[in-house]
Image (tube, rainbow, N blue to C red):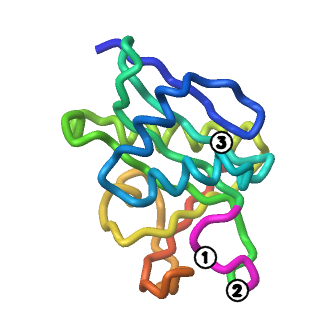
Amino acid sequence: METKIFRLNKKAHYPDVLLNQMKEIDWKAGPHLVKRLEDGDLDSRDEIIVITNQQLTLIGFGALLERDILDKEIYPFSPFLSTIYVDPSHRGQGYSTKIVKALEEIAKEKKNSIIYVVTEHIGLYEKSGYQYQNQVRDQFGRDMRLLKKSLAS
């Protein structure tokens, strides 16, 4: 299937249909990310990748964020790979890995040598070379796993 990839940020112009579909997913993180974008609450270095088919139907998305769901005072590092989502009808086809790799390339473009992930999931990120660091508590009081990857070539 041919796909389109969009890079969204504070300055980018993009089809409204992308954000509307992201708002409709059955996971609170998607609408929360859209709200941050619409409210101008993203950092100037933040980027969102959206993958669609040729008809602009959402396949998946993910974000590279300077500030994620950890308290910046306690965890003063960045950037974070965040909010990786693939529509259920497209899961198991490698799209999450494609999104992760695209976000890693953006992190490299921005001269980052390390990237972090805060997640409950086990497996996806480890397959992409992320290493477990320790347990952390997010801003919602949930116990999460902190992972890290060196982007040095």
- Pick whichever of labels 3 and 1 is earlier in the sequence: 3
Residue highlighted by disc 1: 70
Question: Considering the numbered disc 2 on the image, is that residue within a helix, a strand or a loop?
Answer: loop
Could you say where residue 27 lies in the image, as x and y percent from the top left?
35, 57
Q: Is residue 147 magenta?
A: no
State the separation of the CA atoms marked 3 and 2.
23 Å
Depth check, front residue: 52 or 27: 27
Query: At 50% from the left edge and 81% from the top edge, which residue is drawn?
Result: 140
Residue drawn where x is 33% and y is 42% of the image: 86
Q: Residue at x 69, y 38 (%)?
A: 9
Q: Within the image, what quadrant is residue 15 found in?
A: top right
The alpha-carbon separation of the residues under discs 1 and 2 comes to 8 Å
Amino acid on which disc 1 is placed: Leu
Q: Amino acid at mark 3?
A: Glu
Give the side of residue 123 with respect to residue 67, left or right.
left
Query: Residues under labels 3 and 1: Cα distance?
Result: 18 Å
Q: Quadrant of the N terminus?
A: top left
Res 47 label: 3
Upstream in the sequence, badge 3 or badge 2? 3
x, y percent for residue 139: 56, 81
Q: Tell me the magenta residue range.
A: 67-73
The answer to whether the residue labelled 3 contacts the one labelled 2, judged by CB atoms less than 8 Å apart, is no
- Identify residue type, mark 2: Ile
Whether 69 is drawn above or below 87: the answer is: below
Residue 74 is marked as 2
Q: Between residue 128 and residue 119, name the one nearer to us.
A: 119
Disc 1: CA contacts within 10 A as few (<14), some (14-19) or many (>=20): many
